[in-house]
Image (cartoon, grey):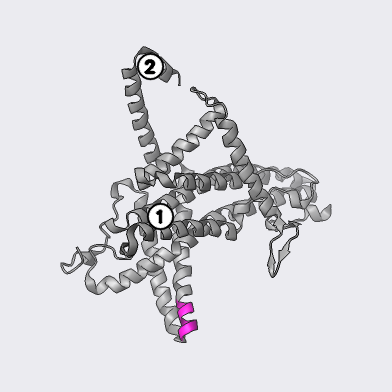
């Protein structure tokens, strides 16, 4: 029990294998991270299926939520890529709803005395998950960009109106800038979730330490408690915001691929 | 919702007009959305920081890689740091310009030398 109380703020990010599985040199265990990804997908599917089940002309509350999500992403895709970009709508919407669900599920409270493997786990706080999503986006940008523009896709690295003697340098900088996209996309989501959850646990740790100190100190523990409440609210905002930013930047990069020649 | 129903009952023309107003409102909403709240400002700050950081990882990383394979020891890293910094500044400028709807076009870079006549059209 003492161990459970003394857990550090990093303990929440620990990967625990649930179903060990080893193929050759690869550890393919089903971990708590995998479990919460499956739960995120399940929750998204359940929400949307329940919301669209009735298909009422005048939407109820749940259906309104689904319609707001649809309109929000559809406007975003149309606004940044144009009408032809709607073929990417399923991808952007899937990305958005998955990241949103994973972020929100990570904020769910722990059931007291439940085994550590079943504690709510923020899959998006691990850089390998966010980086994989970012690489998927960049892979789609590359494949679609080359399929649509052929070698004209390289015009992305040649901005217009640059004097010829400056062009090699500018092209190199543009190239490095392009390579940094998946990294900035992955780091942003990961860093936001990681930092938020660490701060939350540090504040929670203050409460326990102060109550443990007894006397006047246990009265002071109300302040970190209020802080933890405020940060929880902020984390809800960040969960939405980061899902939005990830989807928005995906649209912007897809737009570059679709219109590489005109720029 | 109620307004939509009433409009639909009266005649299809007013419904059409309503949907036009609704579209306009929607456009206005999505346009000013990222600017308004303080949380969005926080997200913007994080965005700019990560844009710079990512380029500063990629540039020197690329330089180190070239050093490793070509054996040009300090020069690849030095060039990579310079390129990474340049790319980082470019990323930050793009990220900020994208959020400013008035200056959304990417055509003119704010480089005073860029207007030279021998440049590409």
Q: Is residue B80 left or right of residue A192?
A: left
Secondary element under disc 2, as helix, strand or loop, is: helix
Q: Residue at x 28, y 52 (%)?
A: B105
The chief SS type of the magenta part is: helix
Asked if one can make out residue A151 in the rendered structure from this viewpoint, the answer is: yes
Picture quadrant where residue B1 is located: top left
Q: Vertical placement of A6 versus A50: above or below? A: below
Q: Residue at x 53, y 43 (%)?
A: A240
Same chain under badges 1 and 2? The reply is: no
Asked if one can make out residue B35 in the rendered structure from this viewpoint, the answer is: no
Q: Vertical placement of A165 versus A116: above or below? A: below
Query: Whole-Å distance between the Cαs marked 1 and 2?
Result: 41 Å
Q: Vertical placement of B107 versus B12: above or below? A: below
Q: Vertical placement of A153 versus A56: above or below? A: below
Q: Quadrant of the C terminus of chain A?
A: bottom left
Q: Residue at x 56, y 26 (%)?
A: A54
Report the span colored magenta. Answer: B63-70
Expressed as whole percent of the image width and height from the top left, the position of residue B113 reads 22, 67
Q: Residue furthest left?
A: B117
Q: Which residue is mark 1?
A: A253
Q: Chain of mark 1?
A: A
């Amino acid at each position: 029990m003492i161990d459970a109380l003394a857990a550090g703020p990093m303990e929440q990010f620990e990967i625990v294998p649930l179903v060990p599985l080893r193929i050759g040199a690869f550890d393919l265990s089903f971990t708590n991270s995998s479990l919460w990804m499956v739960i995120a997908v399940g929750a998204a599917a359940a929400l949307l299926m329940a919301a669209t089940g009735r298909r009422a002309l005048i939407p109820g509350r749940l259906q309104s939520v689904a319609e707001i999500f649809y309109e929000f992403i559809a406007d975003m895709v149309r606004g940044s890529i144009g009408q032809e970009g709607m073929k990417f709508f399923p991808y952007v919407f899937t990305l958005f709803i998955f990241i949103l669900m994973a972020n929100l599920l990570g904020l769910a409270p722990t059931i007291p005395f439940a085994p550590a493997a079943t504690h709510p786990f923020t899959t998006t706080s691990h850089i390998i998950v966010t980086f994989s999503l970012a690489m998927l986006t960049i892979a789609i940008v590359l494949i679609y960009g080359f399929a649509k523009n052929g070698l004209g896709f390289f015009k992305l690295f040649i901005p217009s109106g640059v004097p010829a003697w400056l062009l090699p340098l500018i092209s190199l900088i543009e190239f490095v800038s392009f390579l940094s996209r998946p990294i900035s996309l992955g780091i942003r989501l990961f860093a936001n979730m990681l930092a938020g959850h660490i701060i939350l646990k540090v504040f929670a740790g203050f409460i326990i330490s102060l109550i443990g100190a007894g006397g006047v100190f246990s009265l002071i523990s109300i302040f970190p408690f209020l802080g933890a409440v405020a940060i929880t609210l902020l984390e809800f905002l960040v969960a939405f915001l980061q899902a939005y930013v990830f989807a928005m930047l995906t649209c912007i990069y897809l737009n570059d691929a679709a219109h590489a020649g005109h720029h | 919702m109620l307004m939509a129903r009433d409009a639909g009952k009266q005649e299809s023309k007013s419904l059409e007009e309503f949907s036009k107003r609704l579209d306009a409102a929607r456009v206005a909403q999505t346009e000013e959305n990222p600017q308004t709240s303080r949380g969005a400002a926080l997200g913007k700050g994080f965005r700019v920081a990560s844009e710079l950081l990512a380029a500063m990882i990629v540039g020197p990383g690329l330089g180190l890689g070239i050093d490793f394979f070509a054996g040009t020891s300090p020069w690849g890293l030095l060039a990579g740091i310079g390129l990474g910094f340049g790319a980082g500044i470019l990323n930050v400028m793009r990220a900020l310009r994208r959020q400013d709807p008035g200056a959304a076009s990417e055509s003119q870079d704010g480089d005073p030398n860029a207007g030279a006549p021998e440049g590409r059209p």
